Image (cartoon, rainbow, N blue to C red):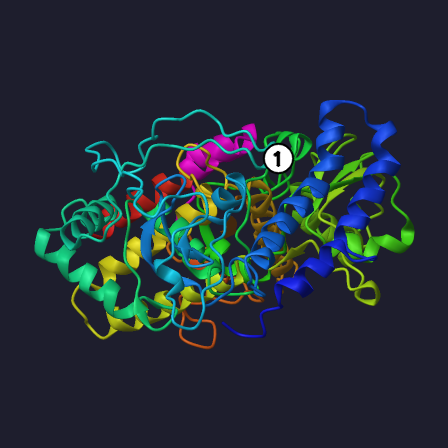
């Protein structure tokens, strides 16, 4: 862990002091309580208060027991053991005991009195748990699919911290044979014909080149997506700049994250860039798009605050805070490039816009935005020792994954057996965790069920893509785009187009293999099907036509 861990007393002062976060949350709540009497309004207003109170209870429990360190100080890390509440795996130690932080809070933050110098904290039972109590039982491994939905238990009752707990499917005591079986299953999702020996070699390469914390090999568990979840939990127990998140529960935020009126990735067709038979089409993709955006994405902590009146003086801080703004009117997009105008053409009154998009429009390009209200994780005040309620929570996770990706890429080029297949599994890990597990209540039973984090990440990736396209040089304009793919036309049907101004990950140089840079994905001659679907404005069917022409071209070459 880098940096100095604040004492429990200092952390408590940040919450309960005269200018602490609880005071601010309470004042904001009382000021707005009458204006939003409904359940959605109450939840948005009072959840920050409850979050601060729960955190304070945990700190006070430790202080009463004789500790002057936060419950989850960075050096409280051990082997994966069952959580004392839910029996799920955790490397975290809360005052020496294996807990998930949210589980510990939910059962009242029990703490064993601080030991003297001759006592081993790790062997002490938690207060309220008999010393001879059996360890929580874990279920036998399931024969169902990798990400099968576990059975639900009754919800715990702890206000905004209530969380559905699920029966565990796995025995989380490390079993090398079970790890190989699960890893082989992940290998065959990417390479169906992989042999047992090839999968074993890939797992060896994984262990050799994917190290975390004190240079220990990182083990694969259950599925690619869940492996990403456990990696976050392991790292968050050690790194102060990460948080042990709580699942998002704010009702308005959940409505926004599930709404089709919320802008995330951009898809469009340019009606003025018309394909014709005899031309060529090229599809460029952003390499590891979400992994490239993760280090700089701001993610909210706890629950957001609802702002009805946005002062002009707040706008610069609003654009860099994670959250959403609701448009009071359709914006004038004329200051934008053509591709950006097409991407944002659907914005209208009532549209919810994640703040990375709002920043690109208003701050980067001078598009005036009419803001009806904002739901944000607010900024702090250094003068009052009030921290931001957000941070780059995915940065450490992404750094570790990118390091492993670089190591496996180099090993594959060097001819290391299994490295290429291990790299494919790693791609599944970061694609599934960042692209799905942050939103999945079905497959993610940890605090990283944060669809708001996913919205901020996806929106940041989309804006990065727009900024790259804004730097195109020469007489070239995209024909269209779908998510991380962008299409260009050329007069050469038998050769791809690489527009100037973009940085390419699939060519030698400073940007080779870099997440967030571009690579050639498909190309081929324009077909009648592509012409027809473009004229009909069918983005998805245009992509299908591009896939088909690329496949036909490759078949001819073979």
Asked if residue 293 is positioned above or below residue 505 in the image, the reply reads above
Image location (x, y in percent) of residue 453 = 57, 47
Nearer to us in this view, 231 or 274: 231
User: Which residue lies under the disc numbered 1?
Assistant: 160
Q: Is residue 476 visible?
A: no
Nearer to us in this view, 263 or 71: 71
Asked if residue 29 is positioned above or below residue 315 in the image, the reply reads above
Nearer to us in this view, 254 or 17: 17
Asked if residue 296 is positioned above or below residue 277 in the image, the reply reads below
Image location (x, y in percent) of residue 343 = 65, 42
Asked if residue 532 is positioned above or below residue 221 in the image, the reply reads above
Image location (x, y in percent) of residue 168 = 31, 36
Crowdedness of circle 1 by 10 Å Cα count: few (<14), some, many (20+)?
Answer: many
Examine the residues drawn in magenta and state their main secondary structure: helix
The residue positioned 90% from the left and 55% from the top of the image is: 313
Asked whether 527 falls inside the magenta stretch, the response is: yes
User: Quadrant location of residue 464?
Assistant: bottom right
User: Quadrant location of residue 496?
Assistant: bottom left
Asked whether 302 falls inside the magenta stretch, the response is: no
Nearer to us in this view, 238 or 211: 238
Image location (x, y in percent) of residue 391 = 63, 58
The residue positioned 49% from the left and 66% from the top of the image is: 74
Residue lying farthest top? 38
The residue positioned 33% from the left and 32% from the top of the image is: 167
Q: Is 147 placed left or right of 17 in the picture?
A: left
Helix, strand or loop at label 1? It is: helix
Q: Is 467 placed left or right of 371 in the picture?
A: left
Q: Which residues are magenta?
A: 522-544
């Amino acid at each position: 862990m880098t940096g100095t861990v604040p004492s429990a007393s200092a952390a408590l002062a940040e919450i309960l002091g005269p200018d602490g976060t609880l005071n601010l949350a309470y004042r904001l709540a009382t000021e707005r309580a009458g204006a939003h009497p409904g359940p959605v309004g109450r939840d948005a207003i009072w959840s920050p208060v409850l979050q601060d109170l729960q955190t304070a209870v945990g700190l006070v429990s430790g202080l009463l027991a004789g500790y002057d360190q936060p419950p989850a100080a960075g050096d409280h890390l051990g082997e994966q053991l069952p959580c004392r509440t839910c029996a799920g795996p955790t490397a975290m130690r809360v005052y020496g005991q294996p807990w998930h932080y949210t589980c510990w809070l939910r059962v009242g933050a029990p703490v064993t009195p601080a030991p003297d110098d001759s006592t081993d904290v790790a062997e002490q039972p938690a207060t309220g748990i008999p010393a001879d109590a059996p360890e929580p039982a874990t279920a036998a491994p399931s024969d169902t699919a990798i990400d099968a939905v576990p059975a639900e238990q009754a919800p715990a009752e702890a206000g905004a911290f209530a969380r559905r707990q699920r029966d565990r499917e796995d025995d989380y005591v490390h079993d090398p044979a079970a790890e190989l079986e699960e890893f082989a299953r992940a290998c065959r999702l990417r390479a169906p014909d992989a042999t047992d020996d090839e999968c074993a070699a890939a797992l060896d390469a994984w262990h050799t080149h994917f190290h975390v914390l004190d240079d220990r090999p990182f083990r694969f568990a259950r599925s690619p997506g869940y492996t990403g979840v456990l990696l976050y939990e392991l790292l968050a127990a050690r790194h102060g700049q990460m948080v042990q998140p709580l699942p998002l529960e704010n009702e308005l935020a959940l409505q926004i994250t599930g709404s089709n009126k919320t802008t995330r990735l951009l898809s469009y067709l340019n009606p003025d860039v018309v394909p014709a038979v005899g031309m060529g089409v090229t599809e460029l993709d952003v390499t590891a798009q979400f992994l490239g955006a993760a280090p700089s994405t701001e993610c909210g902590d706890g629950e957001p605050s609802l702002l009805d009146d946005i002062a002009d003086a707040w706008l610069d801080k609003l654009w860099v805070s994670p959250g959403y703004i609701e448009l009071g009117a359709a914006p004038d997009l004329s200051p934008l490039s053509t591709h950006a105008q097409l991407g944002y053409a659907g914005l209208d009154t009532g549209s919810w816009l994640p703040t990375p998009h709002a920043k690109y429009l208003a701050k980067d390009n001078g598009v005036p935005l009419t803001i009806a209200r904002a739901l944000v994780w607010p900024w702090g005040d250094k003068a009052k020792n009030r921290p931001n309620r957000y941070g780059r929570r995915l940065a450490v996770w992404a750094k570790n994954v990118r390091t492993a990706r670089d190591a496996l890429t180099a090993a594959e080029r060097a001819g290391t057996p299994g490295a290429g297949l291990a790299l494919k599994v790693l791609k599944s890990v970061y694609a599934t965790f960042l692209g799905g597990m942050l939103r999945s209540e079905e497959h993610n039973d940890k605090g990283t069920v944060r669809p708001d984090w996913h919205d901020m990440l996806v929106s940041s990736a989309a804006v990065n893509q727009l900024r790259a396209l804004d730097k195109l040089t020469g007489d070239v304009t995209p024909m269209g785009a779908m998510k991380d793919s962008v299409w260009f036309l050329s007069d050469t049907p038998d050769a791809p187009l690489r527009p100037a101004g973009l940085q390419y990950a699939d060519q030698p140089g400073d940007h080779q293999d870099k997440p967030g840079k571009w690579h050639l994905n498909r190309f081929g001659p324009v077909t009648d099907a592509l012409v027809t679907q473009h004229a009909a404005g069918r983005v998805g069917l245009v992509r299908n036509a591009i896939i088909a022409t690329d496949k036909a071209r490759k078949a001819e070459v073979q």
